[in-house]
Image (cartoon, rainbow, N blue to C red):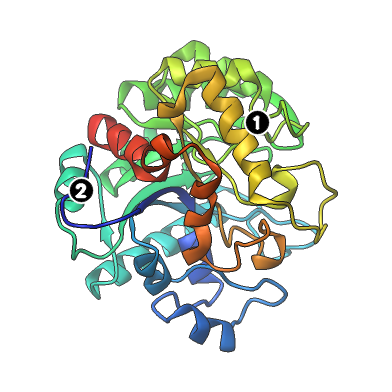
Amino acid sequence: MTDPHLPGTHLIDGHLDLGMNLLDGRDLTLPLDALRAADPVPDQTATVTLPELRAARVRVCFGTLFALPASADTPGGYTDHAGARAQALAQLDAYHRLQDAGHLTLLTSAAGVKAHLDSPDAPPGVVLLMEGADPIRDAADLPFWVERGVRVIGPAWGRTRYAGGTDAPGPLTPAGVDLVTVMRDLNVTLDASHLDDHAFWDAAQIGPRMIATHANSRALVPGNRHLTDDMARAIAATDGVIGLVLLNRFIRPLPEGSLDRVPLAALADHARHYADLIGWDRVALGTDLDGGFGAEKTPAGIDRYAHVPRLLDELPAGIRQSVAWENWARWLTTHL
C-alpha cells in the first residue's frame, strides 16, 4: 500500500494517550515548543502535540480513553465504575471538541480510514481505544461505547474488574469473560497489551480479534507487561499487529524511574525478534509517548515526536515503510 500524495516516510501510531494529556491540562493544539514553555504537567518533558504529529506525518493514531485508578501517587483517580466512566466520558468529549475545531478526525470504520489516508491534507485521524475497561458498566453496556466510536478495548491496565493486568496477576473475571464474549460478537478488537498471562489465554480461548497496540517482547525484558513468544504468535493468528513501545525500561531491563537512555538499536532488537516469530508484516509502532512519561525516559535520539522516524533507520531498508505505517493501515482498512 502506498500513498501517492505524501513523499517520504509517514506514520501510523498504535498508542497515544491524547485524552489523558488533554484532561491533565495540556493544550495539544499548540506547537510542541509552546506547550513545553507552559506545561502544566511537572517533571515530564512533553513530546506530543497535534502540530507535532502533523510535522512527523502521522496520518492516524489510536487515541486512548484511559481512566486512571486511585493510588498513593494519584489520589484523584477513580475508586469505582462511576469514577472511571466519568474520566472516559470527559476524554471522549475532549476528542470531539478537537474534531469540531478541525484539529483531528475521529475514525470508526475501515472505509473511513481508507478515505482518510486518501486525503493528504486532513488532520491526524484518531481511532478510539479504551485502555482498561473499568469505564464499561458491564457487558450489556458495551454497545453504548461502540455507538460512541470505541473500536478497540484493552480489558486491563493493572487489575480491573475484568482482568488481571500489569504487575497484578490473575484471570479474566466472570465479568471479563462476559465482556470479551460480547466484544467478539460485536467485532470489537481486544488490545492484549497489559493483560496478565492468565487473562490473555482466557481471552484467546473466547476468540476475539486481537492486537497489541503497545507491547515489547518478554524474551528481551522480563515481566508480565511484555508479550511472550506464544502470545505474539496467538495475536498474529488472528491477523493481529504488535506496536513497539518507546519507554526505556520496556526496551532493556531497567528499574522504574531510571533515567538511563537506551539506544534505538535496542528497540530494533525487539522488532527483529517479533519479525523472526511472526513476520515483519506484524510489526508496527505503538510509541506510547507522553503516556505517563516524558522525553527523559525515551531512547537516545528521541527528544520529541518528530524524531520517531529515526527508529526506522535501525531496521532493514525494505521493511521500513511497513513498520512505519503500512502494517497498521492494512489492519485498519481490513478490520476496523
- Indicate which disc residue 217 carries: 1
Query: Residue drawn at (19%, 52%), measured in percent from left and top?
Result: 116
SS under mark 2: loop
Q: Is residue 111 left or right of residue 83?
A: left
In the image, residue 335 lies at what x, y percent? 28, 30
In the image, residue 248 lies at what x, y percent? 71, 51
Q: Quadrant of the N terminus?
A: top left
Q: What amino acid is at disc 1?
A: Ser
Query: Residue drawn at (42%, 41%), measured in percent from left and top?
Result: 320
Query: Residue drawn at (31%, 71%), measured in percent from left and top?
Result: 98
Name the residue that disc number 2 marks: 3
In the image, residue 89 lies at what x, y percent? 42, 58
Which residue reaches farthest front?
317
Which residue reaches farthest top?
205
Q: Is residue 1 above or below residue 229?
A: below
In the image shown, does 73 or 64 lie closer to the viewer?
64
Count of all numbered marks drawn on residues in the image: 2
Q: Is residue 318 above or below residue 312?
A: above
Task: For the residues labelled 2 and 1, say whether their Cβ atoms are less than 8 Å apart.
Answer: no
In the image shown, does 43 or 197 lie closer to the viewer?
43
In the image shown, does 322 or 115 lie closer to the viewer?
322
Among the two numbered marks 2 and 1 on one chain, the one whose residue lies closer to the N terminus: 2
Q: Is residue 4 above or below residue 327?
A: below
In the image, residue 118 lies at what x, y percent? 15, 51
Which residue reaches farthest right?
255
Q: Is residue 241 visible?
A: no
Query: Residue drawn at (70%, 37%), measured in percent from left and top?
Result: 166
Within-10-Å neighbours for mark 2: few <14, some 14–19, many 20+: some
Q: Is residue 126 left or right of residue 273?
A: left
Within-10-Å neighbours for mark 1: few <14, some 14–19, many 20+: many
